[in-house]
Image (cartoon, rainbow, N blue to C red):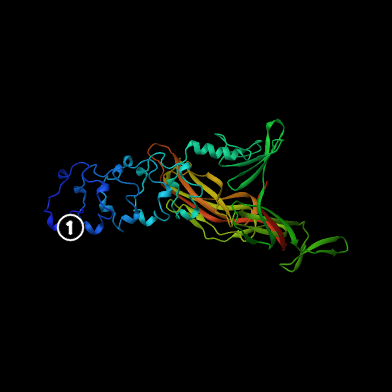
Amino acid sequence: TEKLAANAVTAGKIAAEAIQTNHISAGAVKADQIAANAVTAAKIAANAVTANKIAAGAVETEKLAANAVTAGKIAAEAIQTNHISAGAVKADQIDANAVTASKILAGAVTADKIAANAVTTNKIAAGAVTSEKIYAGAVTANKIAAGAVTADKLTVDQATINKITAGIGQFGGIVTDNVLVKSADGSTFFDGNVIVTMDGLGNRSELSAGRLTFYRELPGGEEESAYYVARMISGTASDGQTIPINFERPPKVLVAPNLLTLPPRDVWWDPNRKEYRLFNPSSERDEPYTDYQIEAYATNVTASGFTVWCRVTGDRTTHYVPMSTTILTESTPSRISGYSNTPIDVISVDLQFEVSVYMYNRSNVDFYFYYDIEYQASGSSTWVKAVNNARETVEINRGYSIIGWATRSKTHTFKREIVVPTPGIYRVRVTRRSVSYTNWWWPGSNEPRNHSMTTRFMGWTGIGAKVLTTGTANYIAIEGGS
């Protein structure tokens, strides 16, 4: 260098392609032959050093002195993704422990420096992330974004289940194939559907589907069950008042009189006898004395409500339910009546069957009517079928006295009574199921013809005790219990 004047060798004095790798002998240029700061960024033209000008293996670790490449020697933005060829950096080109926490500055790796999908499962080798490679406190809640961990990103293997089982065992619990969680003494367990607790006598309580049930062990291996009370309401209601509720199941309802005035009993005297009479508040007059009874009960009990009754009743009376007569046909086979206006315990349905036929003498026709009768309590959606496909027969017979053809008709009125299990307000539905007939005649060419059959629902009456006075009652509605 001391034999070359300043700027004696410049880029303009070196022809293009004048210096190539085969012009420089191995070991010709050594570090001790290049003065300090002899090669600086200002002396290397833009794009002077490119990948195609550096031979394979030209730059290796043993050719770089310690601290030869430092952050201060790499200009800002000098290394970018388009400066690194695909496959340029591979795992076998990075020495073990080459990248450690101490070599990465705080804040050097942040979310904005990692491209979307840069880190995926196929880029992380099996066993690459293990507990010993994660420092204590390295993963905290504020380092996990909301929604970063979801169920589809978690898998549970038998080893994990075993660790959970061991954890439960530390608190005296047992996990088996058939029982999900069980206490150490076996007195309490949960099988995924039912929670069961038992005592030393074999009695147990079970909580399932929102219902708590107690089972008592009986001699001989038998047991009896009783439901615990889920909830209850109480109050006071007037006679005939409907109480709305919102239970899961129909409750048990207890009713007792609260305020009820008994009919006064008068004594009537005449010269020969003493007679008791009752005062009827509705007619405001005395009537012949009859025994009476105090009634307090609930009807139409459902999960949505019930009706309370509190009254004094005397003789039984009949209550007609007004309705127009209805002909039941194949196209309109059913008719529903209105409700009774007072509680009844007997339903009496009036039906009428009318037939006619053109027939010869010495002929006989049997007409068959099939029907259903149902009743429904006020406030209930359930129809109770009291008469199912019953048959009523109407017969027409011609004798021998008058010879020849003639039309014969007949009307048969029929009353069907039904006893309901609980007094209440009811309505009735009658359904015509089918009709048919059977002919018998003689001689062979004189078969009856032109048959006509009509079914009529005439109406119905309810029978119940005569109401003398009404009052108020206390009620308790209990959901659950025995």
**Residue most extreme to the left:** 15
Q: Nearer the viewer, residue 83 or 360?
A: 83
Q: Is residue 347 above or below residue 268?
A: above
Q: Residue furthest right?
A: 271
Callout 1 secondary element? loop
The three-letter amino acid code for the residue at tag 1 is: Ala
Residue 456 vs residue 217: left or right?
left
| Rendered residue at 32%/51% (across/down) | 69
Q: Which of the pair 397/377 is nearer the observer? A: 377
Count the marks: how many? 1
- Relative image position of residue 168 (x, y in whole percent): 59, 40
Is residue 406 something that shows in the picture? no
Residue 445: image quadrant is top left
Where in the figure is residue 452, as x and y percent of width and height? 43, 49
From the viewer's perspective, is 2 left or right of 302?
A: left
Residue 277 picture quarter = bottom right
Which residue lies under the disc numbered 1?
5
Confirm whether residue 455 shows in the render: yes
Name the one closer to the observer, 196 or 380. 196
Residue 197 position in % (x across, y down): 66, 40
Left or right placement of residue 447 versus residue 430 in this view: left
Q: Residues within 10 Å of mark 1 (few under 14, many from 20)?
A: few
